[in-house]
Amino acid sequence: MVVPELRAWRAARPHVVRIKRTVQPHVTRVAQTVQPRVTRAAQSVRPHVVRAAQAVRPRSVKFTTPRLTAVAATAGLALAAGAVAFAGPWDSSGQRTAERDWAASREGEGGADHGRSSDTSPAAPKPAPSAASVLTGLGGSTVSVPAPTQRALTSTLDRLLGDPALGGRRTAVVVDVATGKRLYGKGADDAQTPASTTKIATAVAALSAAGADHRIETRAVLEPGTKEVVLVGGGDPTLTARKEAAGWASLRTLADETATALKARHLNQVTLSYDTSLYAGPALHPIGTNPNLAPVSALMVDEARTDDSASGPVTRAADPAAAAAGKFAGLLEAKGIKTTTPGLSKATRGSQSLASVSSPPLSALIERMLTNSDNDIAEAMARQVALATGRPADFDGGAAAIDAELKKLGLPLSGAHFTDGSGLNRDDRLTADLLTALLVKAGDPAHPELRPILTGLPVAGFTGTLSDRYADDASGTGLVRAKTGTLTGVNTLAGTVVDADGRLLAFAFLASDTSDPLAAQSALDRTASALAGCGCR
């Protein structure tokens, strides 16, 4: 007899998995510590236990299957309660605080997939064996699970996608990730404005062209024979001046090390310049000044934000590079190095390195970009693709580089048109067919470098741009992982979901000419949730 999985368990499964991952290392350590003692104790008490058993055998209680089940259930509930208490409370992002501490305690560790980059210093993290891929099942047992049928999906999705809230044009594709087979298509090749789901294409191109382990360097150099220090931007929008760097490259660290290097050269007063020459073309996006995106520059700190926020719209510095250099000057002064007012310059090839800091691996930047729909990182990633492929690092060069890189991967680009990396430009065009193909490619065992695309997708009801959605549709909470897209009159959603039978599906829903963005979002969320609850055969 096959017992169906309870809906309550399906909803709780993501939390249980997080608890398991949090507690397991501690349980393992405790087990390893006490095992020798337990073994010795067992050997010493075994004769006494045997005698006691023989003495009470006539009066022993017979444990029937129901009794054993009840005992096991009680023990299991007690263990689960202990695990929850041990794991600690939820934090504001929906993550266990203990889980965050667990991850932080391993910041010094590398991995076969995310190990050391070009940094070969003794302090650099050493590669360690990586955990098995989260998608190993794609080539194994998952394939034995039946996939939804086209007829059943059509019956379910046509009704949901017919919601008037989705405007006059809507397209959709659902694909079985294990086989790459399209299970449902509605206007699959009809190119529409994709909004921020464009970032999925940008992410694939960046990871493919530059590599998941690539790091972006920000440098301070000294021009030979002078007292001119040049702050050289490498294109890292996550460079931070905050006291708590939280793992990102720190402008404070760069200033401290620069000051130390200058003092070693007996220099305590310098001319300060900054170099943004890595990027070409206009810094301002075609949409103009906008709180969703700073002017794109090779040198910026905290995405040129004028407050303490880390995501979302906010007023930006009009000149990010000048603002960053000004903060660098203040940090140098605090270390006893007097500077002039920073001015624009360009470092020469003969300049001497004073200090440098590097971003986390590109994989981490990609995950942050997708989770928060970060436009500044997206435009930086488009320029990284351009630089990796020898094109000008501007809007046009980045768009052309993304197109070329995706073509190299054999993706279906018919009708696609790129103008930026973020999707803020309404002239961008993508198809539902391409979006699902990008997600399937990210799950391909032959392309492990693309895995951050799947791990970076927001989780319904928990993280990023989906953290405040699915409140009215709990069936998809924790099960749908998807990139959102919203412009006036445009609502899109593309991601992955595991259906009721355990089959991993990729989907893309694009709606244009919508009039009520909240109603359109809810309609898309309901459609994705339907996939999560669907056996559809």
Image (tube, rainbow, N blue to C red):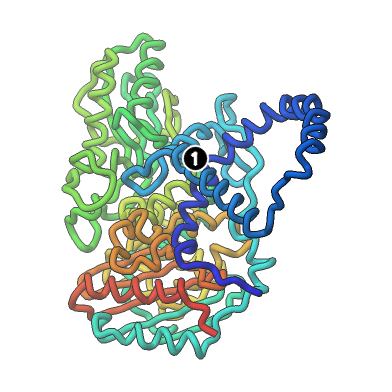
Is residue 272 rendered to the left or right of residue 351?
Answer: left
Relative image position of residue 395 (x, y in whole percent): 33, 60
Which is more toward the observer, 346 or 19?
Answer: 19
Q: Quadrant of the C terminus?
A: bottom right
The residue under the point 33% across, 26% down is 252
| Above or below, comparing residue 358 to residue 259 in the picture | below
Relative image position of residue 171 (x, y in whole percent): 37, 82
Residue 416 seen from this side = no
Circle 1 residue: 82
Q: Quadrant of the N terminus?
A: bottom right
Is residue 512 rendered to the left or right of residue 498?
Answer: left
Number of numbered tags placed on the structure image: 1
Q: Residue furthest top?
A: 266
| Above or below, comparing residue 122 to residue 460 in the picture | above
Is residue 357 rendered to the left or right of residue 515?
Answer: right
Which is more toward the observer, 256 or 170?
Answer: 170
Instruction: Tell me if mark 1 has few (under 14), some (14-19) or many (20+) residues whose alpha carbon lies within 10 angstroms of its own.
Output: few
The residue under the point 45% across, 63% down is 8
Q: What SS does tag 1 mark?
A: helix
Q: Quadrant of residue 197?
A: bottom left
Relative image position of residue 314 (x, y in whole percent): 19, 49
Q: Quadrant of residue 342?
A: top left
| Above or below, comparing residue 225 to residue 128 in the picture | above
Residue 462 seen from this side = yes
Which is more toward the observer, 206 or 480?
Answer: 480
Relative image position of residue 256 (x, y in whole percent): 36, 20
The residue under the point 38% across, 19% down is 225
The residue under the point 33% across, 12% down is 267
